[in-house]
Amino acid sequence: MVEELVAAGIALASAGALYVVAGARVVKQYERGVVLRLGRLMPAPREPGFTMIVPGVDRMRKVNMQIVTMPVPAQEGITHDNVTVRVDAVVYFKVVDAADAVVKVEDYRFAVSQVAQTSLRSIIGKSDLDDLLSNREKLNQGLEVMIDSPALGWGVQIDRVEIKDVSLPETMKRSMARQAEATRDRRARVINADAELQASKKLAEAAQAMSDQPAALQLRLLQTVVAVAAEKNSTLVLPFPVELLRFLERSGLQAQARTEAYERRGAGAGPGSDVRPEAAPEAVDSGPAPAAAPRSAQPSAAPLSGTAPGAEAAAALEELPEAEQLP
């Protein structure tokens, strides 16, 4: 009798241990346990920790409550401005209601993935290429709203949506590269023209300052010579202003005209005259000597007498301003 009671106790303890082992469950901190008893949903999900279910009667499904990162496969579409692009994205979502995620949708991960792909193709068709390349933040917000609307009924909340990459055809890449190069070239030309304008204004101010002080031009010339000589060149180039050459030319013509006028006046005074060629300019006040006109009026005598250069000098003297002509 005692042996039968011991055997029954052992059997009962074994059955109890087997029941505990079969019904014991452990729910992790980031999980929730949804229990279905005979196919019916229990009111509250099981919290993290140790919990028990009825073996053979209850079925518990654990739902992960962490944020899930799901890549969206690249979708190819045509933008609003008729450009073929290939766009891929990534979706961050989490389960906020474990019971709805188990009961209202068969596989919430697959459902969210399909909705994300459909919404991505839709957003591609509604957007321009410039928006896909430069205004992604606005597109991300619109894509998040499009995915979050049906996902709320599944107990899923969309945390964030990001467009990762936009692939363009090679022809479009070359066109955009040419456009960017043209824009950079235009900007460089504008900057260069602005620099030339500023430099011209500064040079005009420098020229005005040098015109007020003629010695400044000579000092600038000496500075240029020093700068060129510092390079140890074998050839030294000295620039001369055009005004200096014109001044030297006018001085030569005036000297030649004076010499010819002295010679003509000395010849017109005669051998017995007491008037010296040096005193001729002070003795005559009526302009050029009258002897110059007959000589220039005789074309046949010019080659014999050799006075053609004098006539040219007299003509050059007459062309000078009144302040520079001889008395």
Image: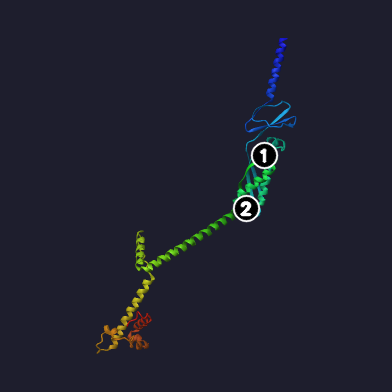
Total residue callouts: 2
Q: Earlier in the sequence, mark 2 or mark 1?
A: 2
Farthest residue toward the front? 43
**In the rendered view, does 268 fall on the left or right side of 159?**
left
- Residue type at tag 2: Leu
Residue 241 drawn at (x, y percent): 38, 69
- Residue in front for this viewpoint, 38 or 200: 38
**In the rendered view, does 271 fall on the left or right side of 71?**
left
Q: Secondary structure at mark 1?
A: strand
| Disc sitting over residue 156 in the figure | 1
Q: Quadrant of the N terminus?
A: top right
Badge 2 density bin: few <14, some 14–19, many ≥20, Cα 10 Å: many
**In the rendered view, does 305 fall on the left or right side of 190?**
left
Residue 152 drawn at (x, y percent): 68, 41
Question: Looking at the rendering, which quadrant does residue 68 occupy?
Answer: top right
- Residue in front for this viewpoint, 154 or 294: 154
Badge 1 density bin: few <14, some 14–19, many ≥20, Cα 10 Å: many
- Residue in front for this viewpoint, 113 or 245: 113
- Residue type at tag 1: Val
Q: Quadrant of the C terminus?
A: bottom left
Residue 67 drawn at (x, y percent): 62, 38
Q: Residue at x 65, y 44 (%)?
A: 73
| Disc sitting over residue 269 in the figure | none
Separation of residues labelled 2 and 1 (CA atoms)? 31 Å
Residue 9 drawn at (x, y percent): 70, 15
Residue 263 at least partly seen: yes
Q: Which residue is mark 2?
A: 129
